[in-house]
Amino acid sequence: MPAPLEVPAARRIFGLETEFGLHLDAPGARTVTPEEVAGHLFHSVVRWGRSSNVFLTNASRLYIDVGAHPEYATAECDTLTDLIASDKAGERIVQALVPEGESRLAEAGVAGEIHLYKNTTDSAGNSYGCHENYLVRRRADFRAFASALLPYLVTRQIVTGAGTITRTPEGAHYSFSPRADHMWEGLSSATTRSRPMINTRDEPHANAELYRRMHVIVGDSTMAEPTTLLKVGATDLMLRLMEAHVRLPDLTLANEMQAIRTVAHDLSGTATVELADGRHVTAVDIQSAYLEVVRSHVGGIIEPTAEVESILDLWERGIRAVAEDASHLVDTELDWAIKRRLISRYQERLGCSLGDPRLARLELAFHDVSPERGLYHRLVGQGLIATVVDDAAIESARTVAPQTTRARLRGAFVEAASTSGQDYTVDWVHLKLTGASRTVLLKDPFRHVDERVDALIESLQTRPQGA
């Protein structure tokens, strides 16, 4: 058994899970169930992977989730740039399934277009999750540790929210986050009967004696890469302080569910939420307090890097954009501001109300992951949305796993086994060739070299195909 690697304090494993909205546009066609559409969409996946739940050569997981929609979970990443590249690669991977899916539907007598949306809600009121995963050290007070993050998560939507047109009987208004109205608890181990901000199910996908997974499910699915950088990067900085036992400002909320809805629907940033100690503060106040304490530890607990400074700069400008009603400060970087600018310009051009169905279609088009149909890609091409990683990195991440984590081992094994035609089983922790007596257990997500995996891959060259 190889000796465990020493893990630097600032190193962390990140992951993103994205549920994609699935829609078939087939006017006049017979009724087609979501299950049928998903089945045609994943036909090629099942053909080579013999399942609709597979791990890819880039070490990510692709599958049909409950509700018959695609879900993509990035491989383990220990840098934010790897995470963003893997996340964006996922959009391309699911979109690449569309042409064959449409062709198979046409053969079944249904001519139409399949659309995949990286958004958080649809017109039927369904919510699609974007889950963030942060590996943290195991601790006896995990619930208290996670609870301390809730005021930050409730209010970070003013900078990292996807933005949305909210329609009510009283009319339509613009909100920071479509996900906020679908949250029902602060902490819970459940995912279906209740939707918590942090899921506390103890499933670390790593050595359970050492690690827990901070599974955050309150965030929006977002398109702009700088938004992902801020969403995950600022949360990581908060966790670094908490793990170092830094005393955070006491901003415990009196009612988290009421607060998250109040914040979501207050674009002015002036509405207050009540704290447990009776004070009333704004989301801007809370985010500013957290930003200040994080900044105060740069050069100490937090190593000063160009990436850290870019996160803090965007965090500060995002807060100012709300406090000063100056969304132009971030309207090429943060989703809520990008969409607000886009919707406002079209609303002015059309001379319509915010509740106009044409604006709803525009908003949906922004989240279409198709390079041809999606509005996001057009805006990037026009230089109206900033990026963090280049196209070559995203394209590489479609097939190549991150090279500095356990993902490298899984990706190499999947590629070798698939190429050799051998049957195998794989999950986040296990690698096994069908028929082999030994399973390789990878409990250290930071380890990217392992002689046991090398031997397993080497054995593929000596096994008869299909054995």
Image (tube, rainbow, N blue to C red):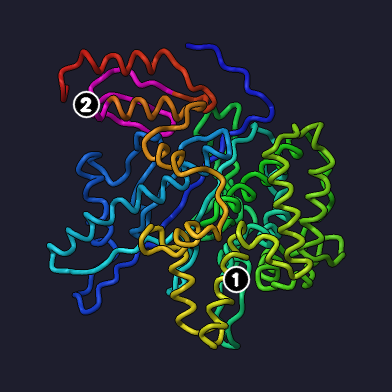
Number of marks drawn: 2
Crowding around mark 2 (Cα neighbors within 10 Å: few <14, some 14 to 19, many 20+) is some
Find out whether residue 436 is within the magenta segment. Answer: yes
Q: Tell me the kind of residue under disc 1.
A: Arg
Q: Earlier in the sequence, mark 1 or mark 2?
A: 1
In the displayed structure, 437 sits above or below 206; it is above
- Label 1: which residue? 340
In the displayed structure, 94 sits above or below 256; it is above
Q: Tell me the kind of residue under disc 2.
A: Gln
Residue at (73, 35) in percent of width and height = 243
Disc 1 to disc 2: CB gap under 8 Å = no
Q: CA distance from mark 1 to mark 2?
A: 51 Å
* Image x and y of residue 103, in percent: 18, 59
User: Which one is in front, 139 or 52?
Assistant: 52
Q: Is residue 17 visible?
A: yes
Name the residue furthest front: 382
* Image x and y of residue 180, in percent: 60, 65
Q: Which residues are magenta?
A: 417-441
In the displayed structure, 461 sits above or below 47; it is above
* Image x and y of residue 463, in percent: 19, 16
Residue at (46, 39) in percent of width and height = 393
- Label 2: which residue? 422
Residue at (36, 36) in percent of width and height = 399
Crowding around mark 1 (Cα neighbors within 10 Å: few <14, some 14 to 19, many 20+) is many
Q: Is residue 183 visible?
A: no
Residue 360 located left or right of residue 11: left
* Image x and y of residue 344, in percent: 59, 77
Q: Please identify, in this view, whether the residue under mark 1 or under mark 2 is nearer the observer.
A: 1
Classify mark 1: helix, strand or loop.
Answer: helix
Classify mark 2: helix, strand or loop.
Answer: loop
In the rendered view of the protein, which quadrant contains the C terminus?
top left
